[in-house]
Amino acid sequence: MKTLSTPSVQICPARYSLIAYGCLLITAIVLFVLKEWQYGFAMLGISLVAMPGNHNKFTERPLWQRTWFVLHFVVLLGAMLYQILSKL
């Protein structure tokens, strides 16, 4: 009997993860175009969860995936700081 704790088991196939990530990014872009900033940034943050790639270790990902993840996270962090500081 195969257990679910083996590292070779994937929770979600890469194809579904890529589709979900793309849909969430497109939704975020549409919300930005409609000037719904808060919802757009929320979708941008949620899309990080569906980011495709190797989820075992960050260092095992290719350089371009790590760069894209860091860029995505920095934009999200900047947007969060902007939202917080604009309310003061």
Image: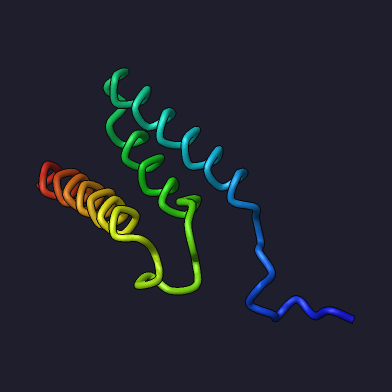
Q: Nearer the viewer, residue 44 or 19?
A: 19
**Residue extending furthest right?**
1
Instruction: Tell me where residue 88 appears, x and y as whole percent.
Output: 9, 47
Q: How many marks?
A: 0
Residue 84: x and y in percent read 18, 49
The residue lying toward the viewer, choosing from 36 and 54, is 54
Query: Residue 61, percent across and down?
Result: 39, 64
As drawn, which residue projects farthest toward the front? 62
User: Residue sitting at 47 percent across and 36 percent down?
Assistant: 22
Instruction: Please name the colour scheme applied to the rendered image.
Output: rainbow
Q: Could you tell whether 53 is left or right of 74 in the image? A: right
**Residue appearing at x 31%, y 55% in the figure:** 69
Residue 24: x, y in percent?
Answer: 46, 36
Residue 11 quadrant: bottom right
Q: Which of 43 and 25 is in front in this view?
A: 25
To which quarter of the image does residue 2 belong? bottom right
Decide: is 61 above or below 80: below
- Rendered position, 4 above or below 61: below
- Left or right for 88, reference 4: left
Q: Which of 38 and 33 is in front in this view?
A: 33
Residue 12 found in image quarter:
bottom right
Instruction: Identify the residue shown where x is 42% and y is 28%.
Output: 26
Please give left or right for residue 42 compared with residue 52 in the image. Answer: left
Image quarter of the N terminus: bottom right
